[in-house]
Image: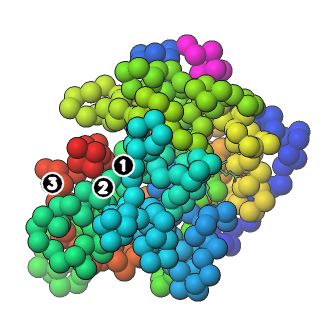
């Protein structure tokens, strides 16, 4: 976003970044206090149910470049170009499609539907090979059992649209592409109109759905009308992220702002009425029922009751954690990771020469908080930490101004830059699922009914 900004100063990994990362360990979560359904003051986020955390992870995997993904190795230059263009196209679901990756699809439906079969325990799970590795578009969506079951929800959503379209008489040769379009557009809708509004607030999203009046419109309008509220019926207006033909993934987003989601992760989760209080990750080699790591067949009775992750029929889901500088203990001992996640994020920011939080705030035209104002931290402050701290100082229910501006600009910018998004192809399109103001909970209920 800001190529001309100086990189933040290089801090010493051992004496400066490692202690900063360690200071982010959430002690309250580690002791388990407050876990058990009740909201812990200063730790839980009553405004964002826990399911949105993993939807954020799912979105991240759809739009970020993944060097280990099987997709990246596809030897087709066009697929490569597409894959490298960040879009809300659910390539993490579809891979490179039924032609190239038939193993993901159900041959009995002429590869129009995804293949979903009960696992060896008779439960619905992702398709897996004999060693338990998920056969899906992006292996990162089997990183933990919550995101893997969200992946399953979206496989079912596609299949559901196929059934609906077939029942309405759509010719067989159009079923896959139309169901794919419906799945993508409903997903795009909830990204912008539900998820983004929850993490950034309505004001920042609404402002980007407004545009200045044209001269003709201004003449016709009264003097008080300076902007037109165009809802989604016109192009999105952005101030900072302006990709032309080639949308790109700004490092300020992927290496800092959108990693805010790491602070939303709980120390443990209730999956359903029976399986309760299971830690997200425990250190080292653990038994199959000890933590929620993915990469293996779903253990028996671990199927998620989504009413515990989203408000469904008036349910009270477990909350996500506040967006603040505290990270759950399990993220300090990730499976297969030599370094705590907080330190990895700080080191990655430095390796990619990110500008400091203060420099980015100034470039965005926002007030920059000094290290002292941020509570006596490194000044200039690493961007990821800055974004979490500004949110924390504002109460932690949603992103602060720098974080929210970057996230809203980039997510809305990717939608705007995608020629096949609903915003560009049918700006007046509305979801066919739900009552017109679709949210993620309604979409999940539809997909899993
Ligand atoms: C249990 C859940 C999660 C785990 C274990 C996890 C773990 C990781 C790891 C290990 C990385 C690579 C770190 C590196 O640079 O070395 C990463 C990257 C990232 N994570 Fe997470 N994450 C989780 C959830 C989330 C959530 C909820 C979000 C956002 C809402 C998120 C956003 C990101 C982003 C944007 C990246 C950079 C991706 C890229 O540029 O390729 N993650 N995560």
Going by the image, does 18 lie left or right of 94?
A: right
State yes or no: discs 2 and 3 in contact (Cβ < 8 Å). Answer: no
| Image quarter of residue 222 | bottom left
Going by the image, does 380 lie left or right of 178?
A: right
Q: In this view, does 282 lie above or below 435?
A: above
Q: Nearer the viewer, residue 163 or 445?
A: 163
Give the percent coordinates (x, y) of residue 189.
Answer: 30, 59
Which stretch did the figure color magenta? 27-33
Give the percent coordinates (x, y) of residue 22.
Answer: 75, 32
- Within-10-Å neighbours for mark 2: few <14, some 14–19, many 20+: many
The disc at residue 436 is: 3
Q: Name the residue under label 2.
A: 157
Distance from mark 3 CB to nearest ligand 1 atom below 8 Å: no
Mark 3–mark 1 Cα distance, whole angstroms, equals 21 Å
Q: Give the mark nearest the N terminus, 2 or 3.
A: 2
| 31 within the magenta span | yes
The kind of secondary structure the magenta stretch mainly shows is helix
Q: In this view, does 204 lie above or below 307?
A: below
Mark 1–mark 2 Cα distance, whole angstroms, equals 6 Å
| Image quarter of residue 449 | top left
Q: Name the residue under label 1.
A: 153
Closest to the camera, between mark 2 and mark 3, is: 2
């Amino acid at each position: 976003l800001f190529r001309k900004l100086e990189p933040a100063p290089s801090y010493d990994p051992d004496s400066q970044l490692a202690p900063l990362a360690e200071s982010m360990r959430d002690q309250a979560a580690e002791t388990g206090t407050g876990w058990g359904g009740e909201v812990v003051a200063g730790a839980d986020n009553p405004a964002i149910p826990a399911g949105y955390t993993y939807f954020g992870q799912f979105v991240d995997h759809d739009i970020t470049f993944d060097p280990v993904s099987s997709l990246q190795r596809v030897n087709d230059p066009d697929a490569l170009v597409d894959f490298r263009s960040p879009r809300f196209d659910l390539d993490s679901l579809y891979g490179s499609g039924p032609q190239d990756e038939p193993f993901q699809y159900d041959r009995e439906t002429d590869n129009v539907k995804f293949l979903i079969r009960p696992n060896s325990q008779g439960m619905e799970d992702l398709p897996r090979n004999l060693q338990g590795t998920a056969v899906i578009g992006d292996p990162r969506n089997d990183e933990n059992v919550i995101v893997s079951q969200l992946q399953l929800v979206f496989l079912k959503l596609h299949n559901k649209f196929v059934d609906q379209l077939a029942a309405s008489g759509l010719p067989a040769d159009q079923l896959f592409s139309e169901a794919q379009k419906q799945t993508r557009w409903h997903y795009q809708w909830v990204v912008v109109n539900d998820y983004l509004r929850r993490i950034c607030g309505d004001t920042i999203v609404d402002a980007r759905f407004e545009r200045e009046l044209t001269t003709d419109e201004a003449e016709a309008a009264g003097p008080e009308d300076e902007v037109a509220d165009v809802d989604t019926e016109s192009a999105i207006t952005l101030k900072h992220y302006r990709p032309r033909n080639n949308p790109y993934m700004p490092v300020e987003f992927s290496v800092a702002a959108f990693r805010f989601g790491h602070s939303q992760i709980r120390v443990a989760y209730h999956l359903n009425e029976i399986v309760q209080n299971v830690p997200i990750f425990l250190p080292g080699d653990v038994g199959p029922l000890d933590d929620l790591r993915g990469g293996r067949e779903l253990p028996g009775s671990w199927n998620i009751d989504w009413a515990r992750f989203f408000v469904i029929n008036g349910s009270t889901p477990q909350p996500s954690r506040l967006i603040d500088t505290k990270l759950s203990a399990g993220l300090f001992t990730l499976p297969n990771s030599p370094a705590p996640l907080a330190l990895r994020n700080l080191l990655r920011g430095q390796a990619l020469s990110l500008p400091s939080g203060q420099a980015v705030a100034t470039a965005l035209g926002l007030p920059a908080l000094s290290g002292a104002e941020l509570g006596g931290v490194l000044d200039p402050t690493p961007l990821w930490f800055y974004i979490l701290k500004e949110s924390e100082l504002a109460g932690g229910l949603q992103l602060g101004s720098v974080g929210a501006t970057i996230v809203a600009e980039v997510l809305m910018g990717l939608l705007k830059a995608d020629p096949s998004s609903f915003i560009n192809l049918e700006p007046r399109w509305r979801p066919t699922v739900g009552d017109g103001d679709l949210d993620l909970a309604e979409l999940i209920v539809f997909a899993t009914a």
